[in-house]
Amino acid sequence: GDSVTQMEGPVTLSEEAFLTINCTYTATGYPSLFWYVQYPGEGLQLLLKATKADDKGSNKGFEATYRKETTSFHLEKGSVQVSDSAVYFCALSELVGGGTSYGKLTFGQGTILTVHP
Amino acid sequence: DADVTQTPRNRITKTGKRIMLECSQTKGHDRMYWYRQDPGLGLRLIYYSFDVKDINKGEISDGYSVSRQAQAKFSLSLESAIPNQTALYFCATSETNTEAFFGQGTRLTVV
C-alpha cells in the first residue's frame, strides 16, 4: 500500500535559519503530494501541493518539488520565523476514478518544528 | 464560524463507556473522513465516506463505527471505549479535486 516517510524530529532552529524537512513516499500509481501544517491547538491546513512530477508547490515562503525519480517531496524555507513553529505533515493522495479525482490521504508521521528568536 | 466543526472539543470518559464524536461541515462537500492522531504516528484513517450512502473502513477501523446522517454530518462512535483509544481525533472533508479541510480536533481521554 501507499506510505509516506518523514525525517525524524523534532527540529529546532534559530530565526532566519534555512529549513529542510525530508519526505519520501511509496505509491503504486502517480499520486498528488501535499504538505499540511498544524499550528498549536488547531487542525491541519494545507500549506502547498504538487500534482505531477517536477511541479513545485509554494506558499508563505515554503517550497517543495515533486521528484518522481527519487520519490521525494522535501519541504524547504530559506529563512524561518518564530511563527513557523508548528507540526508539518507530508501526505499523498492517489488519483482514482480514472484519474479524475483524489482518493483518500495517506500521512507521514509529522515533524515538529520549533523556531527560537 | 468554522467550515468543519467537531463536538466535543475535549472529552474524558471511562473504559467501557459508549461515546460519540460529531462532525458537521458547511462546505457542501460530499466526502468526509475521520482520522486519529497519535504522537510519532501521524494521522491514520479510521473511516471515510464519499457520499451519504457510501461508508468505507480505513486502516484502523476496529473498535469504531460511523454514521453519515446527511451530507453535512458524519459521526464517529466508540461502542466500548478502551484506554488505547486515547488520542486526538480529526474530521475532514473534501471534494473530488480539492485538498482536505480539517476540523479543530477532539481530544479524547479514556481512563
Image: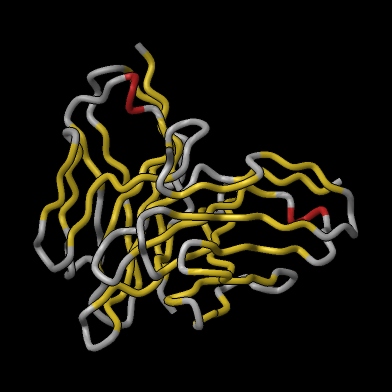
Task: Please identify the quadrant where the C terminus of chain A is shown.
Answer: top left
Is B35 above or below relative to A110?
Answer: below
Is B14 above or below relative to A115?
Answer: below
Task: Please identify the quadrant where the N terminus of chain A is shown.
Answer: bottom left
- From the viewer's perspective, tell me whether residue B49 is left or right of residue A104: right
Q: Nearer the viewer, residue B77 or A9?
A: B77
Instruction: Estimate the x, y position of residue B22 in percent, counting from the top left.
Output: 62, 55
Instruction: Estimate the x, y position of residue A30 in percent, counting from the top left.
Output: 23, 77
Is B94 above or below relative to B57?
Answer: above
Is A12 above or below relative to B67?
Answer: above
Instruction: Estimate the x, y position of residue B37 in percent, counting from the top left.
Output: 57, 52
- From the viewer's perspective, tell me whether residue B75 is left or right of residue A10: right
Q: Residue at x 83, y 60 (%)?
A: B18
Q: Residue at x 45, y 49 (%)?
A: B4
Q: Nearer the viewer, residue B70 or A26?
A: B70
Instruction: Estimate the x, y position of residue A89 in percent, counting from the top left.
Output: 39, 49
Q: Residue at x 48, y 53 (%)?
A: A109
Q: Nearer the viewer, residue A44 or A66?
A: A44
Q: Quadrant of residue B79?
A: bottom right
Q: Nearer the viewer, residue B66 or A29?
A: B66
